[in-house]
Image: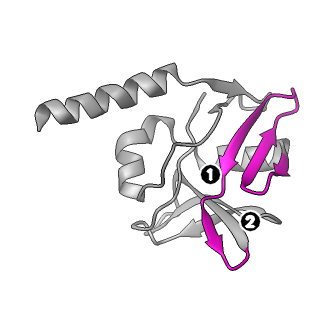
């Protein structure tokens, strides 16, 4: 069990450190991983394993405010003012629309957290109390 956990942790740390982080030319200087993690996680899992790299709601809002968002049919290509880009996948379906939901590490001050929620026609910061639901993770560094 300890060897398995150590192996998983080693793979995560190696992939995170070696991951390509992209400078989008944002005022904060935040750099973003070029694409989201490959699956969705509960909030507790995301915080436990990605905490140092999870964005704040302010960093997610900065993506909305300072980048161009282009819908691709299965997610958004997010283009910074300097022309560099990252990609966020929409991994759920709601009716006829594809949906993407991403965790932040910002608490709402009570029993919820803020995150990023998008559809093909809308991108926004939302608040959720459903911490056991699955959301995706995009990593960043400052």
Element at badge 2?
A: loop
Q: What residue span does the magenta drawing correspond to?
A: 69-96
Q: Report which quarter residue 8 is drawn in.
A: top left
Residue shown at 45% from the left, 26% from the top = 15
**Relative to 80, is 2 on the left or the right?**
left
Residue that numbered label 1 is attached to: 57
Q: Is disc 1 surrounded by few (<14), some (14 to 19) or many (20+) residues within 10 Å?
A: many
Image quadrant holding the C terminus, namely top right
Residue that numbered label 2 is attached to: 119
In the rendering, at what x and y percent does residue 126 appear?
64, 66
Q: Is residue 63 above or below residue 80?
A: below
Q: How is the image coloured?
A: one colour
In the rendered image, residue 70 lying in the magenta stretch gets the answer yes
In the rendering, at what x and y percent does residue 26 appear?
78, 32
What is the C-alpha distance between the residues marked 1 and 2?
18 Å
Dot placed on the residue nearer the N-terminal end, 1 or 2:
1
Residue shown at 76% from the left, 50% from the top = 76
Of all residues, the one furthest to the left in this rendering is: 1
């Amino acid at each position: 069990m300890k060897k398995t956990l150590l192996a998983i942790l080693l793979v995560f740390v190696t992939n995170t450190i070696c991951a390509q982080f992209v400078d989008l030319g944002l005022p904060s200087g935040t750099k973003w991983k070029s694409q989201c993690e490959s699956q969705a996680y509960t909030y507790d899992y995301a915080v436990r394993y990605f905490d140092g790299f999870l964005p704040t709601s302010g960093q997610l809002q900065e993506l909305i405010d300072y980048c161009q968002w282009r819908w691709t049919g299965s997610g958004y290509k997010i283009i910074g003012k300097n022309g560099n880009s990252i990609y966020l996948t929409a991994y759920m379906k709601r009716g006829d629309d594809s949906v993407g939901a991403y965790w932040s590490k910002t608490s709402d001050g009570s029993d919820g957290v803020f995150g990023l929620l998008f559809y093909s026609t809308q991108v926004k910061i939302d608040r959720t109390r459903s911490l056991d639901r699955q959301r995706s993770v995009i990593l960043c560094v400052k």
